[in-house]
Amino acid sequence: MTTLLLIKIAVSIATVIGLSLIAEHVNPRIAGLLSGYPLGTAIALFFIGYEISPEFAAEGAVYTLAGFASTLMLTTGYLFGLNRLTTAQEQQQQETGSWIAIALAGTSGIALFLISGLAIDQLQLNLVTAAGLPTLAILACLWFYRHIPETQVTKRVAMSVSVLLFRAVTAAMIVVLITGAAHLVPASTAGILAAFPISMFPFLILMHRTYGPGKALTVIKHYPTGLGSLMVYATGVAWFYPLLGLLWGTLLSLALATLYLAIAPPYMDRLRQLLISKAPVEP
């Protein structure tokens, strides 16, 4: 049990730190896309399948797929909480994010995730109907996020020990809580919890705290584009875990998710531009 716990912690630390390094050394747009890569979800579903059964994880993955609509409710709630505390002009001028703003935005996001997740848990879903919910949510968020401005990192902040510790503790705690809760709840509830953005959420908080709300908003803007990769991964788990088992089911699902990220983003960008062009002009 101790070894398994250490493995969960080590994997969680690696994913969050890796994503943050990409954001700092590449750009926030790429980081937003990679936030949709099935890092945290893959960890959660793999350990749920390992500790309980591949069949349980596969059943839960159907609701993980639907639960990605709740993930977008989290980013939307974060956006609402941020806008309550800062005006658009202040978001552009503020260099770092205050803990008050982060707490309000984070609480708003988690609340919307839990409320929408509870509603989804009441539904009887299959893969087709489960895929419809996040698809509609992605389209809605691409349109709703269309006016968020792009922000680049102009002054990089060195990664301190406290930042590394925060990343490690937060990601590890979320993984441990979700995989532990899976032993106490039905597969549908466990699946929805696995849709929580384990690696993206602490990353979003750190980017907000370090570089200010503008950087956080840029990540939120591009997050729906990469979410299709998570949808592909969850669908793969639902299909392949019962047939191929944990290892090969995970590898094949990751391969399909990677293929999606290699092909789909340009088309998603075109879709965003189309939605923007069809949107009414603001006065």
Image (tube, rainbow, N blue to C red):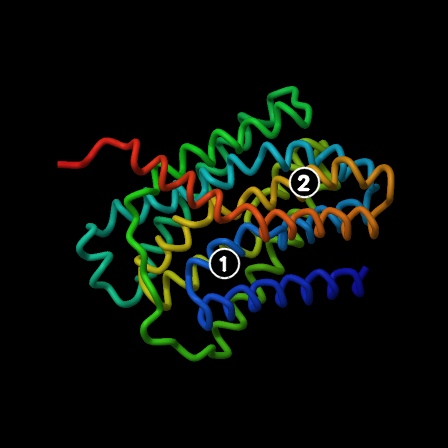
Q: Position of residue 240 (x, y in %)?
A: 80, 40
Q: Quadrant of the N terminus?
A: bottom right
Q: Say if 122 sits above or below 237 in the image.
A: above
The quarter of the picture where residue 118 lies is: top right
* Residue for point 61% across, 44% down: 230
Neighbours of disc 1 within 10 Å: few (<14), some (14-19), many (20+): many
Q: Judging from the image, what secondary structure is the residue with disc 2 in?
A: helix
Q: Residue furthest top?
A: 124
Asked if residue 264 lies left or right of residue 25, the reply is right
Asked if residue 110 lies left or right of residue 184, the reply is left
Asked if residue 282 lies left or right of residue 246, the reply is left
Q: Quadrant of the C terminus?
A: top left
User: Which one is nearer the viewer's eye here, 47 or 220?
Assistant: 220
Which mark, by number, is residue 202?
Answer: 1
* Residue for point 40% across, 37% down: 141
Q: Position of residue 87 (x, y in %)?
A: 19, 50
Q: Give the residue type that dot 2 points to.
A: Ala
Q: Say if 234 sits above or below 37 in the image.
A: above
Asked if residue 48 lies left or right of residue 267, the reply is right
Neighbours of disc 2 within 10 Å: few (<14), some (14-19), many (20+): many
The quarter of the picture where residue 153 lies is: bottom left
Q: Say if 174 sits above or below 7 in the image.
A: above
User: Which one is nearer the viewer's eye here, 168 or 271?
Assistant: 271
* Residue for point 41% across, 54% down: 219
Q: Give the residue type that dot 1 points to.
A: Pro
Q: Position of residue 49 (x, y in %)?
A: 79, 45
Counting residues from the N terminus, which is met first, the one under dot 2 or under dot 1? 1
Q: Judging from the image, what secondary structure is the residue with disc 1 in?
A: helix
| Nearer mark to the viewer, of 2 and 1 | 2
Which mark, by number, is residue 234?
Answer: 2
Q: Say if 113 sits above or below 43 in the image.
A: above
